[in-house]
Image (cartoon, rainbow, N blue to C red):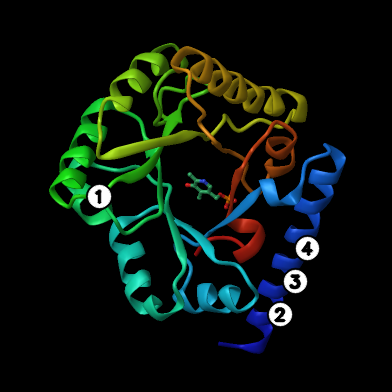
Amino acid sequence: MEEARKQVLKDNFLKLIEEIQEACIDCHRSPEEVQLIAVSKKHLAEDIEFLAQLGQKSFGENYVQEALAKQKELSKLSLDWHFIGALQTNKVKFVLGNFSLIHSIDRLKLAQALNKKALDKKMVQDVLIQVNIGKEPQKAGVLPEDLEALVENILRLPGICLKGFMTLPPHIQDRNKMRNYFSMLRKLKEKMEQAFGKQFPHLSMGMTLDFKEAIYEGATLIRVGTKIFGPRP
Ligand SMILES: *Cc1c(COP(=O)(O)O)cnc(C)c1O
């Protein structure tokens, strides 16, 4: 790996860590409450390895085959992998057990397929429900009004454990409006906790352009790619 690439990754990473800490201070949260997931899709395994040397252990991937290839290549590093992409029911067998958290459960059929495989393997898979907070037709995620029914059904599945909620809000410039979407997800989480008398610890929200707003609104997992790795090839 070239020295110049290492320098870019290191500078980007350290700057991001600093900005995350600043955002936490701004809103009186402890930086320990916010976990950075470095989104490494379409970037090389050697980039991941270098970031691991800098102390970054959690990585997010969107594509099953690509992710498994990188996991194999980096198996000696004991990294914490998150699956954050769209998931097809027929790919469930490949993701189960290979990711500490699957962020993108958005329909009961998918949850049921995962549950079945998990029970076969006698394990429990941690998941988040992806919510289409802006109700955008082209985006994945359960609609806010359908969330409670999905949560209720998922809580009945013993092979998966619901840890919280994830969203990819609409692309907008206005920072206050952006923040409002994150606040909507936080309120939905609180509503579900009330409804089911359970804690759902995680809010997975915030990316390169909006992680600060997400932190202000309670994000516990932020998924940042471009700001660390640069533009995707
Ligand atoms: C690609 C991706 C990210 C990272 O986006 P950046 O803008 O590069 O930080 C985060 N979350 C999901 C679900 C993604 O697909």
Whether the residue carrying mark 1 lies under 8 Å from ligand 1 is answered with no
x%, y% of residue 50?
Answer: 58, 79
Mark 2: few, some, or many residues within 10 Å (few <14, many ≥20)? few
x%, y% of residue 114?
Answer: 23, 41
Query: Which picture quadrant has residue 73?
Result: bottom left
Quickly name the residue at label 1: 123
Tag shown at residue 15? 4
Per the model, the C-alpha gap separating discs 1 and 2 is 41 Å
Per the model, the C-alpha gap separating discs 4 and 1 is 38 Å
Dot 4: element: helix
Per the model, the C-alpha gap separating discs 2 and 3 is 6 Å
Query: Which picture quadrant has residue 88?
Result: top left
- 5 lies left or right of 57: right
> Callout 2, which amino acid?
Gln
Q: Which residue is at 41% across, 18% downward?
A: 147
Quickly name the residue at label 3: 11
Q: Which of disc 4 and disc 2 is earlier in sequence? A: 2
